[in-house]
Amino acid sequence: MATVIGVRFKNLGKIYYFDPEGCEIQSGSHVIVETARGVECGEVAMPNREIADDHIVQPLKPIIRVATDGDMDKLAENCHKEVDAFAICQKKIAIHKLGMKLVDVEYTFDNSKILFYFTADGRVDFRELVKDLASVFRTRIELRQIGVRDEAKMLGGLGLCGRPFCCSQFLAGFQPVSIKMAKEQGLSLNPVKISGTCGRLMCCLKYEQEAYQDLQKNTPPQGSYVSTPEGRGTIVGVSLLTGVLQIHLDSSSQDAAPANYKVSQVKVLHGPAPHSRQKPHERKLKPEDNIVPTEGADS
């Protein structure tokens, strides 16, 4: 076991472990640490805590110091520099006529490097741009191409639901999202309705998926043949969240509206016939079903 603190360098970014060097540091404090990018100032997201050695990436680096007022002033100064650097880089991109969109600029704490984040449809030859920027800022320049999801996380905004982007509010990382999730959740497969502002499938499809999978385990699928208090019938509609099943009873006419039942009110006799071309109310019972038809049912 080792005592560590968790430090975050970006809003909702990944948390990295550091040795607090015997200091009791509270969440929200800032510390100066050595990273692969150089000296950085980060916010403590996790106070002193004991962590198993196998959960720590060795070697565990110690903090340099708790941030002072002077360090915080320098951090604010870097923020002002980033605004100026953003404007300069945009002008240089226009001069070099590059097909790229500048998203953000980040200074390292010690000003040893400036990172420019951009998006582009394909690969961009920005070698001349790097030379031009290096001659202006007199420091190391790094241009990093990011995806549209990362752009949305950096810039923030409002989603289709009217709330701030999940990625910029509480999601620490991006998870794979598939169209299959939208199908299982009964959503429209219209790309406009299931895509976020970034143009990719909405992240909320992923973190709600487990709840839908649990509901599906206890909910019979559409097309199942079931027994209800009013007789047997076929499920023609399923609402997973409310647990309500729409069932077309065998005793009902072809044009009759389906009846609604709770999952707890029905008993599944057998599942749906995958290759049947008959409509649910027209399906004939097979001898192997071992079911005695109720009065008025097809036979």
Image (spheres, helix red, strand yellow):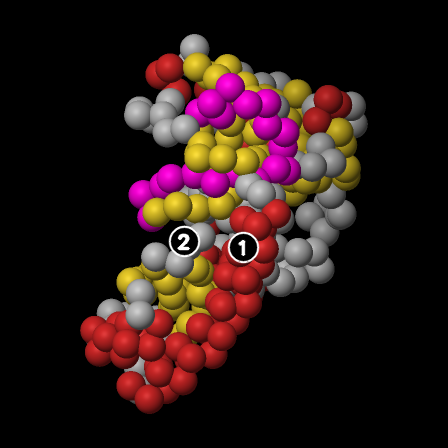
Image point 47% across, 23% down: which residue?
Answer: 21
| Residue 250 visible in rendering | no
Residue type pointed to by label 1 = Leu
Quadrant where the N terminus is found in the figure: top left
Q: Which residue carries the number 1 mark?
A: 75
Residue at screen point 37% across, 29% down? 61
Circles 2 and 1: CB atoms closer than 8 Å: no
Q: Is residue 26 above or below residue 31?
A: above
Magenta segment: 19-37
Secondary structure beneath label 2: loop
Q: Secondary structure at mark 1?
A: helix
Query: Would you identify the image quadrant in which residue 96 lies?
Result: bottom left
Q: CA distance from mark 2 to mark 1?
A: 9 Å
- Asked if residue 261 lies left or right of residue 1, the reply is right
Q: How many marks?
A: 2
User: Disc 2 residue type?
Assistant: Asp
> What residue do we see at 30% from left, 25% from top?
59
x, y percent for residue 155: 55, 63
Of residues 184 and 254, which is closer to you in this image? 184
